[in-house]
Amino acid sequence: MKKKITISDVAREAGVSISTVSNYLNGREELLRPDTRKRVERAISDLEYRPNPVARQLKTGNSPFIGLIVPSVANPFYGVFAQYVESAAAELGYHVLLGNCSRDPGKEKEFAEQLFNYGVRGVVFGSSLVDVSYLSDLIKEGLRLVTFDRSSAQGEKMAFDAVGVDNWQGMYIATRHLLGLGHRRIGFVSGPIKTISRINRLEGYKKALIDAGIEPDPDIIWQMDVSAGYGDSDAIRIGRKATQQLLASPNPPTAIVAINAMFAMGVYSGAREMGVSIPDELSVVGFDDIDLAEIVNPPLTTIRQPLADMASKAVELLVNRLDGKHDGDGICHTFPAELVVRHSTDKPKAR
Amino acid sequence: MKKKITISDVAREAGVSISTVSNYLNGREELLRPDTRKRVERAISDLEYRPNPVARQLKTGNSPFIGLIVPSVANPFYGVFAQYVESAAAELGYHVLLGNCSRDPGKEKEFAEQLFNYGVRGVVFGSSLVDVSYLSDLIKEGLRLVTFDRSSAQGEKMAFDAVGVDNWQGMYIATRHLLGLGHRRIGFVSGPIKTISRINRLEGYKKALIDAGIEPDPDIIWQMDVSAGYGDSDAIRIGRKATQQLLASPNPPTAIVAINAMFAMGVYSGAREMGVSIPDELSVVGFDDIDLAEIVNPPLTTIRQPLADMASKAVELLVNRLDGKHDGDGICHTFPAELVVRHSTDKPKAR
DNA sequence: ATGAAAGCGCTAACAG
DNA sequence: CTGTTAGCGCTTTCAT
């Protein structure tokens, strides 16, 4: 276990002073005479010197890390997102510190605090509760953040940037797709609608219905009652139950739009147990085009978000803030959603 | 943006010296007279003081982080694993730094180096290439590591611990299950068999066959040729292609065991395209009981690994090393695999 | 029981 | 161009 070598070892080896080495290290190479530089370079590589980032951070206050808060990487949607964020950050010289916070504001705050404490100045906030005011203290102290999948609320004055897909439009075209196929009775299946993105999705669905002259029927808009918790692992179970109830009702829907792909899987499961076949007897469309959507039987018609682009934009906005390149009001980037038609949707069967 | 408050602010506020506060902070409270302690406590909470972990680390060399290297959290298997590691680590007071390294030794080494550089002394190695010698330099310098899903190779002397499931036994019972159902011609579908875990799985499969008096037939042991790359995202595609070829062969298998759940999904997909139904015309069993296995149609019969237990054991072993509680040869913990029978396996259809 | 002082490894004025 | 120096915030002997 060889001793850690430091900047002064390098200086000694190269026969220069510490600050000369430091200058070299910090891109002020022009300051060095060519031969001095050569010597420094040789010393560094001979000694296999690696600057200690901890010492550097203590001195400068700059951290090479940004934080990323997601509900759970066990959910592949966020796993994929995390990966995109990671590579976007890497390109800009940052590492990402990942925190799974289960959409729990307490955990999120605690994690953000720890990060801040550790010198991290920026975090990508991949959850989407309506209210992020519980973070305002940290923002005041200098934490920069950008939210993902949380478009701004009405007239809200934001001190942070946001990226997101156009949830409203996504659900609108999803519903229109079903309408276009001839469906008139279209159910909606969701967990608790507590996030702005979900609110917008519901609105898009309703508007499409209304535009088609159909009055949204609360009886077939199924949203889990709040008490049941937030877990994504529950999504399938809830979706299944919702579907069974919907299908067993007096006037069942011929199609269902699900708040996301996991719920869509729940719908599949519920339909299967009720013996109704997709898409012959029930059409379903999901949201979030995760790999799973393509694999299942039948492959799921769904709304796709340009995740990779969204991730790089999020990181870009954040880093701009960190670099002081942008300091004004929050800017909000909305990406278009896209309908991917596969085999879970078809014309309603004549009865 | 209020100024960061430091230990000396607290000392001043409490009217004591810096070292007294430090003593308090580091659990040497017995050294403080009760009233002094009270004053320090008050000062800390009044000022909302939080020690700066960077400074602390610079001084002590101890990092509150451990690393976790996985192929990709976009793969839900590793996403779930990462989550378990995270909570196990949290319980022991560590945070985890996650790196997606795509099973690329170069990336893995680079990431490990960066971590080490940053003062991280331990990493959980959730990939499983046969050869980890490219990390031996770091180990020599003091990096501790524990591997996941990489049982030791023959007689290998390890300087690190390992946890893993009994891959051999898992595939053995999976194959026996099929055999017990009456299958005699059982195919094997896998990507490149470059990892110890995969080698063991293949061996378990072969042994079960041999024990049943069947000679393994290379014609139906399908493993992707090496040149095609490592991506997990390719698993489905490869599995699909393999299945199509297998099914189109002169003497097709009546059952397939897949190297993991993703490949099993590929098998599903291939079978569907060939119009052969599961389990009526083809039985399939997978490995890794990810959520997906339960969702798909039909639900997948598969081998389950006790992931949560494995994750905590991995962290425990690592932390013991870090704390110097264990310093001998590598110890290798193998967990039993369990067969979960669902609906993708059935008796072979009489022809 | 408490305090003074010496760094951990590095950066950034400032002087020369 | 290069070197001296004063910290960043904290821990840890070593005195007192």
Image (cartoon, coloured by chain):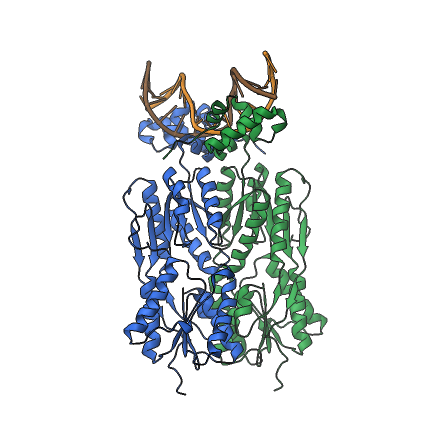
Chain colours: A blue, B green, C brown, D orange
> Which of the two residues, A195 or B154, is positioned nearer the viewer here?
A195
| Number of numbered discs overlaid on the protein picture | 0
Residue B66 position in % (x across, y down): 54, 43
Q: Residue at x 68, y 59 (%)?
A: B336
Residue A104 position in % (x across, y down): 48, 52
Q: Residue at x 49, y 33 (%)?
A: B45
> Which of the two residues, B13 or A255, is positioned nearer the viewer here?
B13
> Which of the two residues, B171 or B131, is positioned nearer the viewer here?
B171
In the displayed structure image, the side of residue A309 where residue B351 appears, left or right: right
Q: Residue at x 35, y 62 (%)?
A: A200
In the displayed structure image, the side of residue A53 where residue B350 appears, left or right: right
Residue B115 position in % (x across, y down): 50, 41
Q: Looking at the image, is B105 positioned above or below residue B257?
A: above
In the displayed structure image, the side of residue B304 where residue A80 appears, left or right: left
Asked if residue A5 can be seen in this view, the reply is no
Asked if residue A223 can be seen in this view, the reply is yes
> Which of the two residues, B142 or B311, is positioned nearer the viewer here?
B311
Residue B163 position in % (x across, y down): 63, 52
Q: Looking at the image, is B148 positioned above or below residue B225?
A: above
Quadrant into which the C terminus of chain A falls: bottom left
Quadrant into which the N terminus of chain A falls: top right
